[in-house]
Image (tube, rainbow, N blue to C red):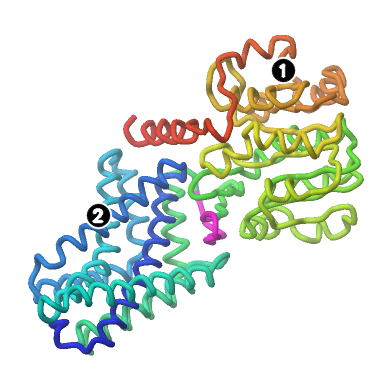
């Protein structure tokens, strides 16, 4: 097919659809590859760069191939798009089993980024060069505008399918590809074959979608008998709940383990329940804890408990798999707000006695902000003088410039009293900070030793020795996000 034979409106429609398909392909592919490679900030950057590199190559080679070659490549690629996103999950699992790492995974990333973006990006240059040379500039303005509008339409479709399974968005995507087959190739036989295969996949979509993700968690994450029970794309991340053979429920956010049901009890005890027992707060704010698993315990000791969780999909997963709504139905002193933690805290007008920071480790910029001295300064403004903020340190505090030390240093910059403990049973450290700590270390240990006899408390008078080499985590010093991400990426794929 020669695009010059088309009418202008038909070519604009082709580009409108190509732009929409490109937006959807970008969203799905970036989310999936971030999940496959584990979602640190450095991985998100790498995956996005790979997609746009594939896009650029599509633009570059478009006019260097003949019409018959373009048609053949387009016809072949549309059927590859029907394997999207299952095929690269299976391939990633196979590569991991085969011991392929490093450059092999990067090659996988590039090839799929090229396949799923080049088909759409190659259309614009060919359309621009229809007609005589004098019309090329006008074509570029008109057709590029049509593609951009299509791209925006694609994002609207993505927004309409937030917090749902992938099927509605995939249906839109495959319909777009089907219409492009008709408009570009004008082959009824090809369209009929595409439609039959697409419908077959749609009717078995959950098996392919959850099956490919389950294999990825079994083979790449090493979860024996992994079975994906919940997989949703929220505006912020991909949220998945995976059940292991032993019944353990794992919550993954962009391919990073957020928590598992086996460790949840220990985490909730030291981060939320124990400080609530000691402080006996009039008002408590829980930032995060989308599983809502600590709410009931905290509410027993708190006059009023407020939960703030940004991601509605995490809350839905919490209700469905960790804390059924009926367990919280009788709590009259608890309320839930779907909001950003820092935004909620900034507009909050009351005085808090306890803030529980149940948020992920600082592996992305958004998460890292909730561990900065600027955020802790905001928390201090909202806390009573003897109010306490409770933080998990993502590891054991040591004398270095790593994450636990940097979080502790940020707390110490803002608050006068900081108590740091390490629980071998929970396998992590915890910090409690206040302007006037309402409990003593002896009070803490009297209760904590009954739960974990091996728990240790860092001597407050020696705490400065542990953090003197640490740069307090702050808005201006978030390089730990990229550094940790790069270290984890290199260790994982390049030994």
Find residue 195 and report its horizontal and vertical position in percent: 32, 83
Quadrant where the image shows the C terminus? top left
Tell me what residue is drawn at x 52 percent, y 61 percent. 233
Helix, strand, or loop for circle 1? strand
Find residue 479 and report its horizontal and vertical position in percent: 47, 32
Find residue 178 and report its horizontal and vertical position in percent: 31, 81
Q: Is residue 356 magenta?
A: no
Helix, strand, or loop for circle 2? helix
Is residue 123 left or right of 163 when viewed as pictured? Answer: left
Between 298 and 404, the one lying in front of the other is 404
The crowding category of the residue bearing disc 2, from other C-alpha atoms within 10 Å (few below 14, some 14 to 19, many at least 20), is: some
Is residue 20 left or right of 39 when viewed as pictured? Answer: left
Give the mark, 1 or 2, whose residue is nearer the N terminus. Answer: 2
Residue underneath mark 2? 111
Residue 18, above or below 111:
below
- Report the disc number at residue 456: 1
Q: Nearer the viewer, mark 1 or mark 2?
A: 2
Tell me what residue is drawn at x 21 percent, y 63 percent. 59
Between 4 and 1, the one lying in front of the other is 4
Find residue 413 and report its horizontal and vertical position in percent: 68, 23
What is the distance, in whole Å, between disc 1 and disc 2 at their CAs?
Answer: 50 Å
Residue range (magenta):
225-238
Residue 197, above or below 238:
below
Residue 366, above or below 395:
below
């Amino acid at each position: 097919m020669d695009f010059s034979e088309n009418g202008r409106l038909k070519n604009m429609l082709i580009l409108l659809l190509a732009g929409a398909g490109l937006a959807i392909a970008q969203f799905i592919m970036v989310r999936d590859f971030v999940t496959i490679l584990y979602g640190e900030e450095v991985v998100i950057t790498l995956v996005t760069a790979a997609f746009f590199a594939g896009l650029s190559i599509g633009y570059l080679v478009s006019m260097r191939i003949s019409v018959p070659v373009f048609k053949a490549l387009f016809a072949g690629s549309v059927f590859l798009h029907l394997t999207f996103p299952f095929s690269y999950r299976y391939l990633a699992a196979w590569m991991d089993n085969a011991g392929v790492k490093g450059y092999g995974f990067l090659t996988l990333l590039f090839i799929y980024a090229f396949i799923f973006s080049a088909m759409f990006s190659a259309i614009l240059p060919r359309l621009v060069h229809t007609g005589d040379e004098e019309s090329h500039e006008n074509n570029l303005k008109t057709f590029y505008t049509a593609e951009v509008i299509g791209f925006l339409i694609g994002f609207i479709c993505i927004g309409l399918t937030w917090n749902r399974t992938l099927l509605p968005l995939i249906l839109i995507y495959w319909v777009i590809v089907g219409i492009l087959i008709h408009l570009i190739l004008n082959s009824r036989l090809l369209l009929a074959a595409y439609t039959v295969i697409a419908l077959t996949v749609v009717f078995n979509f959950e098996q392919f979608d959850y099956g490919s993700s389950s294999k990825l968690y079994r083979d790449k994450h090493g979860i024996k008998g992994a079975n994906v029970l919940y997989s949703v794309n929220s505006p912020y991340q991909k949220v998945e709940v995976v059940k292991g053979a032993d019944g353990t429920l794992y919550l993954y956010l962009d391919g990073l383990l957020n928590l598992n049901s086996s460790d949840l009890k220990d985490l909730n005890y030291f981060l939320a329940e124990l400080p609530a027992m000691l402080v006996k707060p009039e008002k408590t704010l829980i930032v995060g804890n989308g599983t809502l698993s600590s709410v009931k315990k905290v509410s027993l000791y708190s006059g009023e408990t407020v939960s703030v969780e940004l991601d509605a999909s995490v809350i839905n997963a919490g209700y469905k798999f960790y804390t059924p709504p009926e367990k919280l139905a009788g709590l009259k002193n608890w309320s839930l707000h779907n909001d950003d933690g820092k935004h909620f805290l900034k507009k909050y007008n009351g005085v808090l006695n306890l803030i529980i920071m149940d948020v992920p480790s600082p592996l992305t910029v958004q998460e890292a902000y909730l561990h900065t001295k600027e955020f802790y300064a905001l928390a201090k403004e909202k806390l009573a003088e003897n109010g306490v903020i409770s933080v998990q340190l993502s590891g054991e505090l040591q004398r270095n410039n790593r994450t636990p030390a940097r979080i502790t240093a940020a707390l110490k910059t803002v608050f006068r009293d900081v108590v740091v403990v390490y629980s071998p049973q929970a396998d992590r450290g915890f910090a409690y900070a206040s302007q006037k700590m309402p409990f003593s270390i002896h009070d803490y240990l009297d209760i904590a030793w009954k739960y974990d006899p091996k728990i240790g408390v860092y001597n407050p008078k020696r705490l400065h020795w542990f953090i003197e080499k640490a740069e307090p985590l702050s808005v201006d010093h978030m390089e730990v996000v990229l550094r940790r991400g790069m270290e984890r990426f290199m260790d994982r794929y390049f030994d």
